[in-house]
Amino acid sequence: MTLALAIYAFEPQLLSIATSGETRRLSREAYRQFEAGDTISAYETALLGLRQDPQNLRLRRLVSRIFEQTLEKMREKHAAGDESAARIYREQAIEIAREHSWIDDAPLLRFDAKQRER
């Protein structure tokens, strides 16, 4: 009975250790996917990790990098005259910015303002 109580008392700590290990695994996997050019899978994997640890700085930095890369692709497509693709990247950037409050969406707003001026 004492062992069962001891295990029950430490259960939150054990769960935290397991969650921490899973978050690290997800973080490694998300970075691997990102470096391989699979941005969508990297973002989805990062989201899984952030659900377990919303304050994980490594995953937050990765999501910020994905956001920046999405903005770059949007600008490239716009400069090349491919408005359809630029619009898709813009929508993805908006979705990322809405999902994550720490994302600075000012570059996206500036791009939109320039588009309205034209």
Image (cartoon, rainbow, N blue to C red):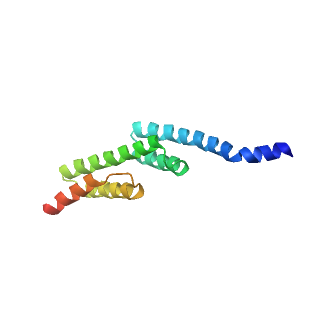
Percent x, y for residue 49?
Answer: 52, 46
Residue 38 visible in this rendered orientation of the protein: no
Q: Residue at x 41, y 54 (%)?
A: 100
Percent x, y for residue 56?
Answer: 48, 44
Residue 107 visible in this rendered orientation of the protein: yes
- In the depicted structure, whether residue 36 falls above or below residue 108: above
Percent x, y for residue 41?
Answer: 45, 46
Image quarter of residue 105? bottom left
- In the depicted structure, whether residue 47 falls above or below residue 33: below
Q: Residue furthest left?
A: 118
- In the depicted structure, whether residue 88 falls above or below residue 7: below
Q: Residue at x 17, y 57 (%)?
A: 114
**Figure quadrant of the C terminus:** bottom left
Q: Nearer the viewer, residue 45 or 15?
A: 15
Image quarter of residue 101? bottom left
Is 40 positioned to the left or the right of 11 in the image? left
Q: Residue at x 48, y 50 (%)?
A: 47
Q: Residue at x 80, y 47 (%)?
A: 5
